[in-house]
């Protein structure tokens, strides 16, 4: 590991801690998660034989921040962090920076957080740059506490029963709104089907902890960037997956730490191998600002029939993809979409409060955007240097 990469990763997590503390969102289990990161960084510095003269000031700065947060919130620190304080600051550490009033305890005995989380992902649109009828490719994911999954499954099935629909009916926005003659939804008018989808989104948003999305307005992607994707072994879909994975991971740091999250996505045989390669590369990247830190295991593919939450991601992605076309002043949506603008904006207003923030300063600094922009499936390396590409 390079010194620059090590320093940038630790400073990035320090910025996240600052942002969460300022927002009043630090609980004991989150402070423990940051302690884990600091202890791991100390181990990496040793293993990589990084110069003490360069690493010590960085460790001192983030340790001061952790201690300040612990004292302000009256939270204990771990035995391991206390030992690191003595190692870094010397025996006069207590005089130098002060200490929390509570007795330390082994980090293994510290709270692990309220629960574990899962992310369910689906896409709206296609990977083709030539498909004018679908100008936006959108990946949408719903982040949910594991103990809420069954709750939402029951809510969705109750909604079907309430409308006299078969239990095996699936919520897919396009299929419901167009409703073929043999569809169980065909008995409703277009307005009634729209209201049903809106209610499904409202109930879903109430159950989930967050919504993450990444949209590409393909018509506005210049030829030079399309060529660059191909040179990197990517297409519109796999390129979006790379950026979606990293921004999801960082945006959810304060939500899913320290337990992390499991990742489920709708069945996509055409892109299954690329998804696996992308996540394996990002999960094992030596560049800490390009590494997935919250992911547990590898992505799991689900058939939408198995999961109401994949169906929720489908419906949310459908509306976000269409809302994106109204956001860009230089793009004119098709007339067929314009007549539904109000309904689309209404659904967006339900989704917006749960959107994950991945561009705030404290999160932004945890990502090496240049290296992300240079990510390639053709290269054996998964963590290209920031010098290899500039962020768009």
Image (spheres, helix red, strand yellow):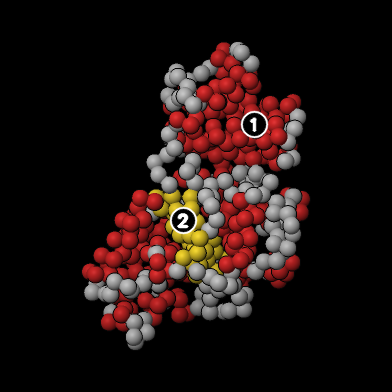
Between 188 and 333, the one lying in front of the other is 188
60 left or right, relative to 329: right
Q: Which residue is mark 1?
A: 42
Residue 185: percent from left, percent from top: 31, 78
Q: Residue at x 50, y 56 (%)?
A: 263
Q: Residue at x 45, y 76 (%)?
A: 337
Q: Secondary structure at mark 2?
A: strand
Between 139 and 218, the one lying in front of the other is 139
Q: Secondary structure at mark 1?
A: helix
Give above or below for 289 relative to 234. above
158 left or right, relative to 51: left
Between 172 and 284, the one lying in front of the other is 284
Q: Which residue is mark 2?
A: 119
Which of the two labelled residues, at mark 2 and mark 1, occupies the earlier sequence position? 1
Residue 80: percent from left, percent from top: 55, 26
Quadrant in the rendering for residue 391 = bottom right
């Amino acid at each position: 590991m390079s010194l620059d990469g090590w320093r940038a990763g630790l400073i990035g997590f320090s910025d996240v801690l600052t942002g969460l503390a300022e927002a009043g969102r630090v609980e004991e289990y989150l402070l423990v998660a940051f302690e884990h990161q600091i202890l791991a960084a100390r181990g990496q510095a040793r293993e990589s034989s990084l110069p003490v003269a360069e690493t010590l000031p960085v460790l001192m700065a983030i340790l001061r921040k952790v201690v300040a947060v612990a004292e302000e919130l009256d939270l204990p620190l771990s035995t391991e962090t206390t030992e690191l304080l003595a190692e870094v600051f010397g025996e006069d550490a207590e005089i130098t920076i002060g200490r929390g009033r509570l007795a330390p305890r082994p980090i293994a005995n510290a709270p692990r957080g309220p629960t574990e989380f899962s992310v369910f992902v689906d896409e709206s649109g296609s990977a083709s740059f030539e498909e004018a009828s679908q100008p936006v490719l959108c990946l949408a994911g719903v982040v949910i506490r594991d103990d809420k999954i069954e709750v939402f499954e029951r809510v969705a099935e109750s909604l079907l029963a309430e409308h006299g629909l078969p239990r095996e009916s699936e919520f897919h926005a396009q299929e419901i709104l167009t409703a073929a003659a043999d569809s169980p939804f065909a008995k409703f008018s277009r307005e009634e089907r729209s209201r049903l989808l809106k209610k499904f989104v409202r109930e879903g948003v109430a159950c989930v902890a967050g919504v993450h999305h990444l949209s590409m307005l393909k018509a506005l992607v210049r030829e030079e960037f399309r060529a660059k994707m191909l040179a990197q072994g990517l297409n519109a879909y796999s390129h979006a997956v790379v950026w979606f994975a990293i921004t999801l991971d960082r945006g959810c740091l304060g939500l899913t730490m320290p337990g992390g999250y499991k990742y489920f996505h709708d069945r996509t045989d055409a892109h299954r191998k690329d998804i696996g390669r992308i996540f394996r590369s990002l999960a094992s990247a030596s560049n800490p600002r390009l590494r997935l830190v919250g992911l547990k295991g590898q992505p799991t593919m689900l058939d939408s029939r198995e999961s109401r939450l994949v169906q929720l991601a489908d419906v949310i992605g459908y509306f976000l993809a269409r809302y994106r076309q109204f956001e860009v002043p230089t793009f004119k949506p098709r007339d067929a979409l314009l007549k539904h603008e109000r309904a689309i904006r209404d659904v967006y207003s339900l989704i917006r409060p749960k959107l994950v923030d991945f561009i705030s300063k404290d999160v932004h600094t945890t990502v090496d955007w240049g290296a992300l922009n240079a990510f390639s499936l053709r290269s054996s390396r998964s963590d290209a240097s920031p010098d290899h590409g500039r962020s768009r």
